[in-house]
Every structure is written in structure tokens, then in C-alpha cells.
Image (cartoon, rainbow, N blue to C red):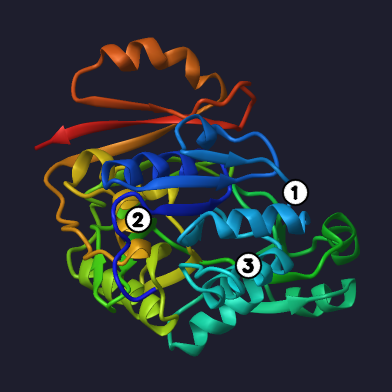
Amino acid sequence: MNDPLAPGAVIGILGGGQLGRMLSVAASRLGYRCHIYEPGAAPAGDVAFRLTTAPYEDEAALRAFAASVDVVTYEFENVPAAALDLIESLVPIRPNRRALAVSQDRLTEKDFLSGLGLAVAPYAAVDSADDLAAALAGQDRAILKTRRFGYDGKGQLRLAAGDDPAAAWAEVNAPAVLEGFVDFTAEISVIVARGADGAVAAYDPGLNVHEGGILRTTTVPAGVPGRLIPEAVLIASRIVTALDYVGVMGVELFVTPRGLVVNEIAPRVHNSGHWTQAGCAVDQFEQHIRAVAGLPLGDGQRHADVVMENLIGDDMDRVPALLAAPDTQVHLYGKAEVKPGRKMGHANRILRR
């Protein structure tokens, strides 16, 4: 796909959660239609042009989906490789497969980032209890993470000196990576976009606060030393350029006394970028659609200070008050059932214009 998609074209989205929902809304503003492919419940289906509900192993459904769209993107990383192989043989996928391959495996991701000369937490591959014992030697604190399928704190186990490696391995029991603990003062994230023409645009870094492994708030400006802002943006730009990336990426970084350390990357629109809906003329969702459709990237300049708060589980009880609050946007995801730890929506509150 060399020319920009014309209005009326169809963008396929793998995954039907809240990110797919908000991507579909953004696409509609630019005159595009979205076809969602989702094996399970699909909040995105409420606002999309078309929804296919089928497993990723259904070859006929995948072929029909690919035949109905002009380009394919995704809202989460863990689409099976076989499904991607089939789709890619029929229609372009943006961002590219390399970005997925890197981000789907924590060890591959660490190797890629360190290969760029970027600072990451000390790490070691762990494939057995013996590997874990060796990697833990000399560590005061560390985090054992499964190499694949971890999100929102899942697939992670915090360890300290004296913990039993055999017991820890029995709990995880999957290919993993042990990361040494990083003594950081803050976590920030950069939402960066790269267009089909190689142009790069980044949003201001946001300050992230987590509770129980789940993002609770992102605040912009981040309140970190000013010299770190261009450094963070440069790191994010180096990553997307090295991957020949097209689309929006979230890059999480630790602020430490020795500088910025890359925590992880997400090859998609990101929870910590929801603030852009209230703080920028072109939010991260429109930016991603622009990129994958071959349009020029938009202006990511921030026009307001914003705090984004995730609405998790029983936070839904606060929605009436949030709806009545000044300078506050409420975004609900249309999920049928409220559960502890489930992201049900978010609120963007403008702090200053």
C-alpha cells in the first residue's frame, strides 16, 4: 500500500476490546470503516462497521476477513503467528510483523533494546529452576516474568534474596526472564508515532502511577527534569525507526539517578496515551489510523495539562459524579460485566489549559 487509503476504505482490526473501540471511532471521523476480528466478547463491535466473531484458528474466517479490508492493524500483541501468516499473505499488516515478534517475547524485547544501546534492567533467560537459582545469585530483589502473555501485572513474580528458586519456578513454570530490580523514582511513558513515509511524531511523556500492577493514572506534564523530555522522545524515536514501524507505540521508561531505563514497549495505542483525547488536537487513536492509512501524521502538540484515570471495577459507581464534574471527559468501554481489576473506562480531567 503506497497511496493513502481513500475515504470509505476498510481498516481491519485484530482484537475487539476498548482500544479497538476507540480506534474505530477515530477511523470513522476520517471517513474510514473498521472491520473487527475478535474470538470473544467485542466492545468494539458496538461502534464498528463490521464484526467477525471467530477463533484465530478459523482459516476460512481469516481469509474472508482479509478479503474484506484494505489494511490490517491490531489492538493487542498476542495474535497467534499462524493467523498473522495467513492474513499477511493477503493484505498488508501495520505495524509490521517484526514489531510483534519483538514485543511478544520479553527476552527478545530486552535483546533488541539492549542491542540498540539503550539501558534496560539487568536480565537473564530462565528455563528451569537451576537457571533461576543461578540468575538470582547476588540479587537482592528481582522480578521473574513469563516471556509471553503477561499484561497488567500478570505472569510476574517478585523475588527477594533467600526466596526458594524451586518454589518460584514451580509457580511460573514457563519460559521466563529474570529482571534485576531497577531503583527508579518515577515511571514515564512516551506515545510515539511513525508514518508510512518515515516521519516521526511524539507526544509529551506522561507520569504513570500503578496499583496492583494496573495503571491507575497518567499525568501530563510528567513533572520530571526538563532535560529528560527530549531524551525520552529520542529513545522512543530510535525504537520505531529501528523497527521500520508504522503506527503508534507506547514506550515505558524508568527515571533513575543514572538516567532513563527502558521498561517495555507496546506496539499499539496504549493506556497511558488516553490523555491525548483531552490534551491534543490529534489524539493517539487518530494518529494511529493516520499512520496505517498512509495519511500525514497529525500535530501531537499538547494544549492542556491532563490527568487520565482508569475506571477499574467498582470505580463505575463514581461515573455519575464524574459526569457532573467540570473539565472532565468520561469514556466507557461498553463491557457487560463489572469485575475487580477489569478496566471499564477512563476519565480525562483537564487541569490547566
Q: Quadrant of the N terminus?
A: bottom left
Residue 330 vs residue 79: left or right? Answer: left
> Label 3 sits on what residue type?
Gln
Which residue is located at x 28 percent, y 27 percent? 329
**Residue 122 visible (yes or no):** no
In the rendered image, which residue does mark 2 sit on? 289
Label 1 vs 2, first from the N-terminus: 1
Would you call the spot at circle 3 few (<14 residues within 10 Å), some (14-19), or many (20 or more)? many
Q: Marks 2 and 3, how far apart in space?
A: 22 Å
> Label 2 sits on what residue type?
Ile
Would you call the spot at circle 1 few (<14 residues within 10 Å), some (14-19), or many (20 or more)? some
Can you give x and y, in whole percent of width and height, for residue 206 in the image? 30, 52
Q: SS class of the residue under badge 3?
A: helix
Which residue is located at x 45 percent, y 71 percent? 262
In the rendered image, which residue does mark 3 sit on? 104
- Label disc, if present, on residue 55 of the rendered structure: 1
**Residue 225 visible (yes or no):** yes
Q: Quadrant of the C terminus?
A: top left
Can you give x and y, in whole percent of width and height, for residue 193 in the image? 32, 65
**Answer yes or no: do the residues labelled 1 and 2 have beta carbons within 8 Å?**
no
Q: SS class of the residue under badge 2?
A: helix
> Label 1 sits on what residue type?
Pro
**Answer yes or no: do the residues labelled 3 and 1 have beta carbons within 8 Å?**
no
Q: Nearer the viewer, mark 2 or mark 3?
A: 2
Residue situated in front as seen by the camera: 53 or 261: 53
